[in-house]
Image: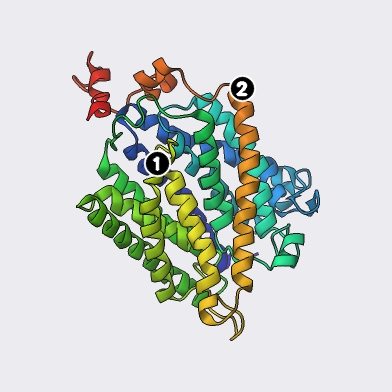
């Protein structure tokens, strides 16, 4: 069997998407406080290891094999170890799908920065991927409940989710909100602003995410024409979202920020993910601008409502994910002159399908994540002690520091005082 151009493109796309998780590690690591930077990086990196193992053993089978439990999930015993795919080209697509599962669970970690036990996270990742991500991926992409052949899809119509508005971003955003509520606020939250400790690293992380996102959105392109549209839309939406976010900052805060620019790019990428093959470039600009403005405004709600979403996973991924998913119902291009979004005369059918899929995802993910999180909190224990939180989770969980102050090869005696200065900054 010869390697085709499509096979090569999917392999390259899979590599690009895998690179996004280290990019996310930089993005979150720079946003975190200095005494929690390594812990944030480790939560992303260990997700690669844990999900990679789960995916080979049973995860892929749960997303692609014949459905069980009324179309909720694929049979986890049907494809154990992927042995049936050895010697076939199927493994290329399987590897590509694995990278989506990895980045989804890694996204959640930013919400619980500074206070999460690493051992508890290592329990949460494989359990959540097994019980939440895999079933939802099957329901949307594997022929389950939300697909055209599923019970919900047949009644309300099939929602468009090209690369993961529901499966990845709404899913991760809701899970992040649940974990935040279960773990509670960080010590001193609301009394001072926890500043990002390394903004250039944040920008590097955002750049790697944007670079990898072309594979994230484009890997499943079915034609050259579709691939070109996806590429341009993956450029246009984040660009408009960045400008929208900076506009909000300029009006609200009096000046634009580097962190705002990076966050706006991510919000635009999130929004265009489900819609990248369904919108025109101008529609992508509109969607991106709305997502950038919406996410920038949303992050302020956590202080009003009182939940401590450390790195704004809820404000960016849940809000922009909802905007992107529901926005398809307004901005989707007609297919062969028929259908399309509300703004193209397609009626409300597609909008209803998008809203139903988004609401179902929020309820499904919220309930199951709450059960998993509460079980871990009451057994293993999800949160570090107040003393360890004050010392920093890099030290308490990993016995490491991201930075050494003082002579090379040693840690200065006042290191903890140095890294904790940001709390009072």
Residue drawn at (51%, 29%) of the image? 183
Residue 347, how many percent across, how many down?
A: 60, 78
Query: Nearer the N terminus, badge 2 or badge 1?
Result: 1
User: Left or right: 167 with respect to 405?
Assistant: right
User: Left or right: 328 with respect to 210?
Assistant: right
Task: Name the secondary structure under disc 1.
Answer: helix
Residue drawn at (51%, 40%) of the image? 176
Q: Residue furthest bottom?
A: 337
Task: Name the secondary structure under disc 2.
Answer: helix
Report whether residue 8 is seen: no
Packing grade of label 2 (10 A; few <14, some 14-19, many >=20) is few
- The residue under label 1 is 304
Give the Cα separation between the discs numbered 2 and 1: 28 Å
Packing grade of label 1 (10 A; few <14, some 14-19, many >=20) is few
The vertical placement of 106 against 295, above or below, is above
What number is the disc on residue 378?
2
């Amino acid at each position: 069997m010869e390697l085709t151009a499509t096979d090569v493109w999917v392999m390259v796309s899979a590599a690009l998407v895998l690179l996004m998780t280290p990019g996310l590690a930089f993005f979150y690591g720079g946003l975190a406080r200095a005494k929690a930077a390594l812990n944030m990086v480790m939560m992303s990196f260990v997700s690669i290891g844990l999900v990679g193992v789960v995916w080979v053993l049973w995860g892929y089978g749960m997303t692609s094999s014949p459905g069980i439990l009324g179309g909720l999930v694929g049979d986890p015993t049907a494809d154990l170890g992927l042995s049936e795919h050895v010697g076939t080209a199927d493994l290329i697509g399987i590897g590509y799908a694995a990278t989506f599962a990895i980045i989804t669970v890694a996204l959640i970690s930013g919400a619980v920065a500074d206070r999460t036990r690493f051992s508890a996270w290592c329990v949460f990742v494989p359990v959540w991927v097994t019980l939440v991500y895999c079933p939802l991926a099957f329901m949307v992409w594997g022929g389950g409940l939300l697909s055209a052949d599923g019970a919900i899809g047949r009644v309300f119509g099939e929602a468009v989710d090209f690369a993961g508005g529901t499966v990845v971003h709404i899913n991760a955003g809701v899970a992040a909100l649940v974990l935040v509520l279960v773990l509670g606020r960080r010590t001193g939250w609301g009394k001072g602003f926890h500043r990002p400790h390394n903004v250039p690293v944040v920008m590097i992380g955002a750049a790697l995410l944007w670079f990898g996102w072309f594979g994230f959105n484009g890997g499943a392109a079915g034609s050259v024409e579709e691939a070109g549209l996806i590429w341009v839309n993956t450029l246009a939406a984040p660009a408009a979202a960045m400008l929208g976010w900076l506009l909000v900052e300029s009006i609200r805060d009096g000046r634009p920020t580097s962190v705002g620019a990076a966050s706006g790019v991510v919000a635009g990428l999130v929004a265009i993910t489900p819609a990248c093959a369904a919108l025109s470039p101008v529609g992508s600009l509109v969607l991106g601008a709305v997502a950038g403005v919406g996410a920038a405004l949303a992050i302020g709600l956590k202080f009003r409502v009182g939940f401590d979403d450390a790195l704004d996973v809820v404000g960016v991924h849940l809000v922009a994910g909802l905007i992107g998913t529901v926005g398809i119902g307004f901005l989707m291009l007609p297919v062969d002159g028929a259908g399309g979004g509300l703004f193209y005369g397609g009626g409300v059918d597609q909008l209803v399908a998008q809203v139903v899929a988004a609401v179902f995802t929020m309820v499904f993910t919220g309930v199951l994540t709450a059960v998993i999180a509460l079980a871990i909190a009451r057994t293993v224990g999800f949160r570090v002690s107040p003393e360890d939180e004050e010392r920093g989770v890099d030290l308490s969980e990993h016995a490491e520091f991201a930075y050494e102050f003082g002579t090379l090869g040693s840690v200065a005696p006042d290191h903890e005082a140095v890294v904790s200065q940001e709390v009072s900054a």
